[in-house]
Amino acid sequence: MDSKDDKRDVSCSSPVCVHNPHLDALKDDILYHFSLGTATHDLPAMFGDVKYVCVGGSPWRMKSFTEFIAAELGMENPKSEYPNICAGTDRYAMYRVGPVLSVSHGMGIPSIAIMLHELIKLLHHAQCKDVTIIRIGTSGGIGLEPGTVVVTKQSVDATFLPKFEQVILGKPVVRNTDLDQSLAEELLQCSKELNQFETVIGNTMCTLDFYEGQARLDGAFCSYSEKDKQDYLNKASEAGVCNIEMESSVFASMCKLSGLRAAVVCVTLLDRLKGDQLKSSHEVLHSFQQRPQKLVGYFIKKQLKAKAILN
Ligand code: R2B
Ligand code: URA
């Protein structure tokens, strides 16, 4: 099967672009996995002033991110209650404080892709402008001290190429996985100012699986040797790969198509050159997972201060 490059013109009149002529014919666009819709909810009133969207795998983590951001921005509500906007479904969770929306996406490309289709339509219907979107997550590092934060330069596939392949009507379509380089640099600068943990900019490999897909030796099945694994991870490292996770490629490609300024910020939980199993204590893993939140919290606060929205 030949693959085709998706070189469509991404310019469009809306600040958050959808490229789908069929949408105009829908009387009610039902965002099924959010339990929201254009006929049942006033999306511009609910979301029109959102400026930052942070997405991450776990619903619990995205709620705690909202609580953290509320405290950072001095926008805590007196009861400290942040209702799940998607309470009508258990597929994804969504929280909001001030201009910051926080949404969970589950694990893997299919799960985040479904969420992003509906999130991009939500931002489009709500007529949001100047939105920055950041994925905060976890990853396996290559040759980095565990706890290092990686801001993704390029998301690459399992052959180390910066592309995402989507099968459409039975044919593979190749999409670009470029992320916003100036945003990555701004985040790196924020980490220097925060001065609490090591942060690097590097390539992130996005895989379809946590075990065989990431060259682990501890899955239910494994047909390769320790040396095969080390050779593969060393090749990844030579290609500039600093960490491995499971969502960045489709995230980058969909954000690029919709014209969203996007970044991926993941902490490394272990060094994959030294092992496969996550042996650190719950406390250590928990504190590592807070690092992307802290960095993005600092970034948002700095930006809002510069725009004189905060004192
Ligand atoms: C990082 O962690 C998850 C797997 O444990 C996956 O969602 C990812 O990208
Ligand atoms: N998430 C991954 O996808 N891989 C790891 O090794 C750790 C977290």
Image (cartoon, rainbow, N blue to C red):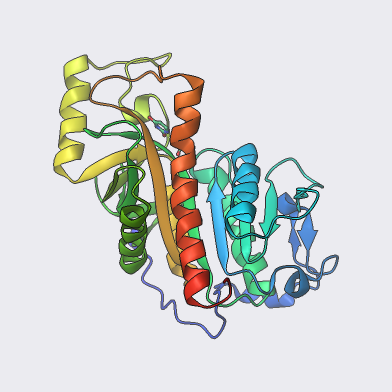
Asked if residue 131 is positioned above or below residue 175 in the image, the reply reads below
Q: What residue do we see at 53% from left, 38% from top?
A: 107
Q: What residue do we see at 78% from left, 69% from top?
A: 38
Q: Quadrant of the C terminus?
A: bottom right
User: Which residue appears farthest toward the front when viewing the image?
Assistant: 311
Asked if residue 284 is positioned above or below residue 53 in the image, the reply reads above
307 left or right, relative to 268? right
The image quadrant that residue 22 belongs to is bottom right
Q: What residue do we see at 16% from left, 36% from top?
A: 235
200 left or right, relative to 119? left
Image quadrant, ligand 2 = top left
Query: Foreground residue, 72 or 101?
Result: 72
Residue 179 visible at all:
no
Query: Foreground residue, 236 or 306?
Result: 306
The image quadrant that residue 43 belongs to is bottom right
Asked if residue 138 is positioned above or below residue 44 in the image, the reply reads above
What number of labels is visible?
0
Q: Return the x and y of residue 87 as percentages of the image width and height.
A: 79, 47
User: Which residue appears farthest toward the bottom when viewing the image?
Assistant: 13
Q: Return the x and y of residue 92 as percentages of the image width and height.
A: 67, 45
Q: What residue do we see at 66% from left, 73% from top?
A: 49
34 left or right, relative to 284? right
Residue 305 visible at all:
yes
Q: Return the x and y of residue 173 as percentages of the image width and height.
A: 40, 58
Q: Return the x and y of residue 45 as percentages of the image width and height.
A: 77, 73
Query: Foreground residue, 79 or 168?
Result: 79
The image quadrant that residue 46 belongs to is bottom right
